[in-house]
Image (spheres, rainbow, N blue to C red):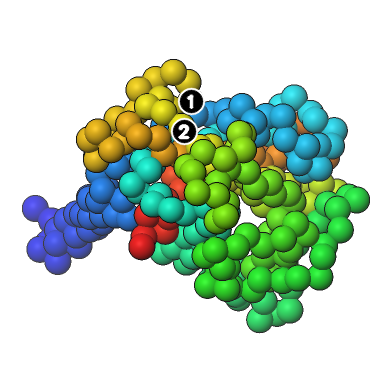
């Protein structure tokens, strides 16, 4: 029989990680979104249809090697009552602030801050032929809730950059719900196409004018009939690549973790959109 202290230590070494995983799973199941809302998130290993044709893909991955990229996306449909009178720009700005300003991003933000102490970014962002506009946003809390950063703006100490943005849909001056057709989006790049790692986050909003999700499928949600009055489809696509070689920039298991990380970041972004 093992000595009691050793037995206790062994038991704790097995029980504490299991308890931690259980607590974390329970926490993530109910925060920052309710479990019922989280279950409406749809995920995919490919980009959204509009992301697949984005001009920014040629910026981050100019050689377009066939086996050097990892992609994933997720979407959620928010009802008209959930997005209230927010414009496309306000939805995207709030999502961007929540994505980089939620609790999930805190460890990465801490590492970025540590690198800033030494006067350098964690992974310096930069792309061939893409000019920075001289504007910088150092902290997620400095991202406005009503207005998107302009194209060329550097985010979080030189680690990210706004590659492109487009706004459609209803503006403040419009009285009706529907506006100009098509999606509104903002694309945030990271890494460097001249090095071994680069990528892009694309956040997009598509207005739904009837009771479908944009693919002919009926929308259902937590608010009953009100969900059938139209709302928005909020989509987040992410791509990471090795711009210099025809291989992934990191081992496959890293991207498995990243999908979980991206899901958590997405939920933080959605929470900020829903927050009044």
Residue 250: x and y, percent? 64, 42
Q: Looking at the rendering, in which quadrant would you find the C terminus?
A: bottom left
Residue 214, horizontal then vertical, whole percent: 48, 25
The residue at 49%/43% (across/down) is 176
Q: Residue furthest right?
A: 129
- Residue placed most toward the observer, 217 or 187: 217
Q: Nearer the viewer, residue 171 or 17?
A: 171
The residue that appears at 22% across and 35% down in the rendered structure is 224
Mark 1, secondary structure of its residue? loop
The image quarter containing residue 113 is bottom right
Checking the image for residue 208, the label placed there is 2
CB-based contact (under 8 Å), mark 2 and mark 1: yes
**Labels 2 and 1: the sequence-earlier one:** 2
Q: Residue furthest front?
A: 175
Indicate whether 253 appears above or below 30: above
Q: In the rendered structure, find residue 214 and report the number of the disc placed on it.
A: 1
Side (left or right) of 199 relative to 209: right
Local crowd size for mark 1, using a 10 Å CA cut-off: few (<14), some (14–19), many (≥20): some
């Amino acid at each position: 029989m093992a000595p009691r202290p050793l037995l206790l230590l062994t038991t704790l070494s097995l029980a504490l990680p299991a308890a931690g995983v259980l607590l974390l799973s329970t926490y993530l199941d109910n925060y920052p979104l309710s479990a019922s809302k989280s279950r409406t998130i749809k995920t995919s290993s490919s980009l959204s249809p509009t992301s697949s044709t984005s001009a920014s893909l040629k910026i981050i991955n100019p050689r377009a090697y066939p086996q050097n990229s990892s992609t994933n996306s997720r979407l959620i449909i928010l009802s008209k009552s959930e997005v209230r009178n927010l414009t496309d720009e306000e939805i995207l700005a709030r999502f961007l602030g929540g994505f980089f300003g939620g609790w999930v991003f805190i460890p990465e933000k801490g590492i970025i801050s540590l690198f800033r102490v030494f006067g350098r970014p964690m992974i310096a962002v930069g792309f061939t032929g893409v000019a920075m506009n001289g504007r910088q946003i150092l902290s997620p809390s400095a991202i406005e809730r009503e207005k998107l950063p302009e194209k060329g703006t550097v985010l979080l100490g030189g680690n990210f950059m706004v590659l492109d943005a487009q706004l459609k849909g209803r503006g403040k001056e419009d009285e009706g719900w529907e506006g100009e057709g098509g999606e509104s989006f903002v694309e945030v790049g990271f890494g460097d196409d001249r090095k071994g790692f680069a990528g892009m986050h694309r956040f997009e909003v598509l207005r739904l004018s009837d009771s479908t999700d944009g693919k002919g499928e009926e929308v259902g949600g937590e608010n009953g009939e009100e969900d059938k009055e139209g709302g928005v489809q909020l989509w987040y696509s992410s791509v990471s690549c090795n711009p210099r070689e025809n291989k992934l920039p990191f081992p496959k298991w890293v991207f498995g973790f990243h999908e979980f990380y991206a899901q958590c970041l997405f939920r933080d972004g959605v929470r900020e959109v829903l927050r009044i």
